[in-house]
Image (tube, grey):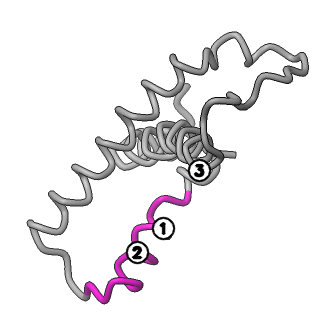
Amino acid sequence: MSIHIGMHGRVIVLLVRKMFGIIDSNRIGMIVMRIIALAITIYGIKSSFDRNMGSKLIMYYSFDITNADESALWTLISYLSIMGVYIIGTYYILKGGLKNYIFKTTLEGKR
């Protein structure tokens, strides 16, 4: 699901700009948004290791989703930041030209 949301990253960026009333792109706003994206990514990677997400990717059901010592809000923030890693990663991979490369090679019949 996170990768799918990341594929629509351009729409999300436009919605955020509309929500905050940003008409044209400015350098300071771009830098602030990239710092926020970097912070989400760093915390998401940390949360992924703290929650041992790698072992939970196997197809079995696990009951250790939450920690009894942790608040529900922190649990939600942790899981949303893990999703953010994949959303932001997909957005920047596609923005970096991989999407254009795939479409060009498909249309030209290469590979």
Q: Is residue 108 visible?
A: no
Q: Residue at x 46, y 77 (%)?
A: 15
Which one is in front, 91 or 29?
A: 29
In this rendering, position of residue 71 left or right of residue 32: right
Specify the principal SS of the magenta part.
helix
Magenta-span inclusion, residue 63: no
Q: Residue furthest right?
A: 61
Q: Residue at x 75, y 29 (%)?
A: 65
Q: Amino acid at mark 3?
A: Leu
Residue 69 horizontal/vertical position (percent): 63, 30
Q: Residue at x 53, y 24 (%)?
A: 48
Residue at numbered disc 1: 12
Q: Which quadrant would residue 64 be assigned to in this image?
A: top right
Give the mark, 2 or 3, whose residue is nearer the N terminus.
2
Circles 2 and 3: CB distance less than 8 Å? no
Specify the label residue 73 is tagged with: 3
The answer for how far apart the CA atoms under marks 1 and 2 are is 6 Å
Q: Residue furthest front?
A: 69
Question: Is label 2 in a helix, a strand or a loop?
Answer: helix
Q: Which residues are magenta?
A: 8-22
In this rendering, position of residue 105 left or right of residue 22: right
Specify the label residue 16 is tagged with: 2
